[in-house]
């Protein structure tokens, strides 16, 4: 985990372009990434429930 954080902090390019992986800007998670917001689903949910992401509201039907 420490190595991953170090790579993210340095913003190093991978050796091969194919290995590029989208990561959450908040926590660094690579899975369940929402590209429009550049966040993972967990961070997106917590920030949207707090009202930190403009234009996002909780839906109910």
Image (cartoon, helix red, strand yellow):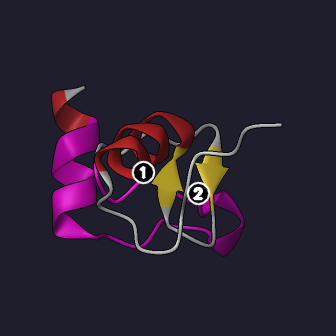
The location of residue 36, given as percent across then percent down, is: 62, 73
Task: Give the CA distance from mark 1 to mark 2.
Answer: 24 Å
Can residue 11 be found in the magenta stretch? yes
Q: Nearer the viewer, mark 1 or mark 2?
A: 1
Q: Residues within 10 Å of mark 1 (few under 14, many from 20)?
A: some
Relative to 55, say whether 41 is above or below. Answer: above
User: What secondary structure is marked by label 2?
Assistant: loop
| Residue 45 as seen in the image, left or right of residue 59 | left
User: Which residues lie in the magenta part?
Assistant: 4-26
Residue tagged 1 = 48
From the image, which quarter does the C terminus lie in? top right
| Residue 10, quarter of picture | bottom left
Q: Which mark is residue 16?
A: none
Element assignment for label 1? helix
Q: Is residue 20 left or right of residue 10?
A: right
Q: Quadrant of the N terminus?
A: top left
Q: Using the image as rendered, state which of residue 57 and residue 9 is in the foreground.
A: 57
Residue at horizontal 54%, vertical 63%? Answer: 56
Q: Is residue 13 left or right of residue 21?
A: left
The 10 Å Cα crowd at callout 2, few under 14, some 14 to 19, many 20 or more, is few
Q: Provide the residue designation for mark 2.
A: 21
Q: Residue furthest front?
A: 61
Query: With respect to residue 52, does 44 lie above or below?
Result: above
In the image, residue 3 sits, relative to residue 24, either above or below, namely above
Q: Nearer the viewer, residue 47 or 34?
A: 47
Asked whether residue 8 is drawn in magenta, I would say yes
Report the number of discs: 2
């Amino acid at each position: 985990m420490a190595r991953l954080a170090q790579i993210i902090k340095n913003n190093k390019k991978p050796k091969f372009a194919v290995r590029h992986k989208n990561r959450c800007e908040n926590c660094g998670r690579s899975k369940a990434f929402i590209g429009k917001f550049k966040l993972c689903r967990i961070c997106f949910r917590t920030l949207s429930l707090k009202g930190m992401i403009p234009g996002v509201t909780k839906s109910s039907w």
